[in-house]
Image (cartoon, coloured by chain):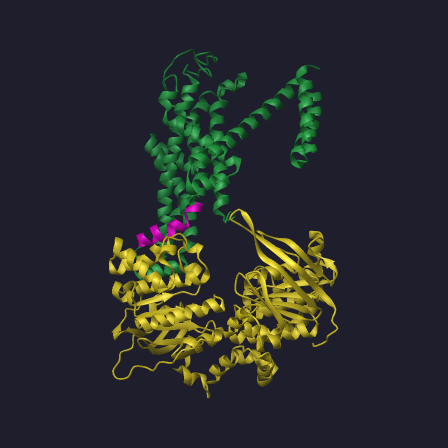
Chain colours: A yellow, B green
Amino acid sequence: MADTKKDLLLKIRDLRIEGYSDEKWLEIVHGIDLTLHKGEVMGLIGESGAGKSTIGLAAMGFARDGCRISGGSIEFDGMELTTTSESDRRALRGSRIAYVAQSAAASFNPAHKIIDQHTEAPIHYRIRKRLEAQEDAMELYERLRLPNPQEIGFRYPHQVSGGQLQRAMTAMAMACRPDLIIFDEPTTALDVTTQIEVLAAIRDIVEQFNTAAIYITHDLAVVAQMADTIKVLLKGNEVEEADTETMLSNPKEDYTKSLWAVRSFKREQKERPGGGAVPVVSVQNVDASYGDTPVLHDVSFDIYAGMTVAVVGESGSGKSTTARCITGLLPPSSGKIVMNGVEMPPGYKQRSKEQLRQAQMIYQMADTALNPKVRICDIIGRPAQFYMGLKGGALKSRVDELLDLIELEPSKYYSRYPTELSGGQKQRIGIARALAAEPNFIICDEVTSALDQLVAEGILKLLDRLQKELNLAYMFITHDLATVRSIADEVVVMKQGEVVDSGPKNEMFTPPHHPYTDLLLSSVPEMDPNWLTTVLEERGVDNIGEAATV
Amino acid sequence: MNYFVIGYYALLIGASCLAAYYSVRSAFLLLFSLTLVSFIVGIVGGESALWTITICAGILALCIGTAYAFREFLVIVLWGEGSKAIKTAPLTATFGLFVIMTYAIAGIFAPIIAPYGEAEVIAGAFAPADENMLLGADQLGRDLFSRLVFGARNTVGIALLATTFAFVLGALAGLIAATLGGFFDNLMSRVVDVIMSVPSLIFALLLLSIMGTNAFVLIFIIAIIYAPRVFRLTRAVAGNVVVMDYIEAARLRGEGLWYLIRREILPNSTAPLIAEFGLEFCFVFLLVAGLSFLGLGIQPPTADWGSMVRENATLISFGEITPLFPAGAIALLTVAVNFVVDWMLFRSSGLKG
């Protein structure tokens, strides 16, 4: 890969893109230069709003609705994309430039079989006949290590798992053997154990066909595995560009350094209170099922005041279901939930106002967790009004106090609507709403996974501070082990509805581990660019997939 | 050849040249193709055909002018959010608003505007228009214009009340069904299925002949017929809102059904409901007019556009256009409401951000 005499493939010079909002055009990408050679992989990283995806799409000569390319040049293999006709550009897309989107589930048409969607492009461009294209698809599936490559293409998208679908999508992008593939956060929505399979598959196939790629992500550790060079973006400007080794070991700009430093937030691990302390929440031998499908089996753990218990596991492992049992949304079929020594009625409808007040919840998607038609003051004020009976001036001063607590200026945000806030601010409002009920226990359901790393770190620090000030107990549901490392006191590892391992954080992160904990831990990408290769060698390439399903 | 024809072509060609000179592409294409069409129409239909084209174009221009002026007027008169929304509204929408406003004024101030009473006989049957009667008299010698104005009050008023009632009934049931789910949802959905399985006009005729025809029965029956459609839409819209996390948060807080519906669900489903209100209003309006035409709606001597069409229908065979006035009034309002609804749908579909 370190071939110095590579052919120039993509040359972007002084690219400017404008977006339409509030009845005027605003520049969102301010003059980006980008050079990509054949077979080279470039990583684009930055927070949301940095213009990563916009630049990625512009490399195909495409601008989203409400955006336009307002200046600069995009030269793909000697062809100027900003001036060629739309039909010529369309001919390039799919055949010579391909795009892999973040959510494969949303990008596949659920009404057609995977292989039919795969063969659409090659047949359309008359590169292959239908049968040849199908055989080729099966070969690609095999190379991407999908199980049953002969048969899997004939399934519908909902019949395969998320990681398999993402790999099928990569295969589809490869169908016409393009010169350039744009990967837009292809693994962000996946679990760590699935992510590693997809990363390995993408890296191999890009190498095998000597395809150039632009890899867009906000996860530094992932980009370190995939890219030859890394370009850091901030608000539509380039911060710096260097090859991966240099960038990781010796970043020049302060902003890059701050990105690198995010993962270093860590706090002291607290011990359980001794003596006869009663846990705030005690989950005791809980079984639960959705209809006839059992989802939880004999789940037990305790959470003490002022402590954070992280519940980790892949999606489908029953983390969120446990939370639903605790809140009473899903009454357990057996076992009980005890809060402060009092057994809770199983369903939330049977619980008293006071019992409901004690446990509050913060959601993953702040967008759907806040009513877009209700003002901030009413969102936060409602629990205070509902539980404490505050009115008028007392209510207003309580809302102000809460806004202060989450570090948002009361006068500025008091009467805004949620849509006028950024993702991190929305999440803070979600926290304030939980705090308004003055609970002693808060369930945090993947609260940081939809946020950028810098913003997520801010939220974690806030949660930590609030815990110290208000002696709150947290149940922290997450699949991100970096978060666990920074904030948890105790860890509960779940798999297929059962608790497989639990204990204080430091014990959990030092060997010997339970085999599943070990698999989870070793799947977390590290900043070392050779990490993926090392892990794959250790596990043996052929059983990465199997290891994840054991 | 006369001066009108010469002037007609001279104007069109001159305007085309101007448009071409200032390179206003669409205007040029429109004007010049109109010129070409006019040549053919002029040869086939003679001067009178050209007059028709001129009058149509004049009316269209008048409508556009009215809509434009009315939009500017609303932008100045309204304030805040409303003024902002009107500024970007298409001309069709403001034209619709203008028509609706005119009808509303006619309905509200009917006794002041109408020169004669609703049931006052002032001339012979089917008397032609003169300086007393703008549009002539109907089959009993009553002033058609006065009856048209009173008809606005009766027909539109009943349609509005019936639609509102249907909405209150349907939307409330839909919201409760979506929020509670389970048994209540099933029960309501089956009831709705039963009502919808009966053809609406026959159902209305049946009920009206059983219960007798007066305005309140009419409103009640129409509300029953149209509430199921509103129920279905509301249930579907609210169904999408109910699964959101903020509803779960409110439920976990221990909020009651009424709070959930009023504060959390309803504000997030108003846009499609308002658009649906406009559409349903048109259907209800047509149903009221249709029932009146069949003789089971609003009873004489109360003026009503549907029955006015029926009563004067015989005049059509004598080449009179009198019965077309109430029919035109119905058509114009329906079109106007649809213009406004289209605009609201466009806004609520999120295209405007």
Residue found 25% across the figure and 60% down from its top? A388
How far from the left and from the top, in percent, is residue B101? 43, 31
Q: Residue furthest bottom?
A: A512
Hey, which quadrant is residue A171 in on the image? bottom right
Q: Which residues are magenta?
A: B257-272
How far from the left and from the top, in percent, is residue A463? 38, 70
- Is residue A550 in the magenta section? no
From the viewer's perspective, tell me whether residue A545 is left or right of residue A458: right
Residue found 29% across the figure and 57% down from its top? A397
Q: Compare residues B115 and A25 and report the one nearer the observer.
A: A25
Does any portion of residue B71 appear in the rendered image?
yes
- Is residue B264 in the magenta section? yes
Residue found 41% across the figure and 81% down from its top? A505
Q: Compare residues A234 and A158 and report the one nearer the observer.
A: A234
From the viewer's perspective, tell me whether residue B63 is left or right of residue B138: right
Q: Compare residues B169 and B103 and report the one nearer the observer.
A: B103
Q: Is residue A31 above or below residue A473?
A: above
Q: Is residue B210 above or below residue A288?
A: above
Q: Is residue B46 above or below residue A106?
A: above
Q: Quadrant of the N terminus of chain A?
A: bottom right
How far from the left and from the top, in percent, is residue A196? 56, 76
Name the dominant secondary structure of the magenta segment. Answer: helix
Residue found 57% across the figure and 78% down from its top? A545
Does any portion of residue B199 appear in the rendered image?
no
How far from the left and from the top, in percent, is residue B324? 50, 23
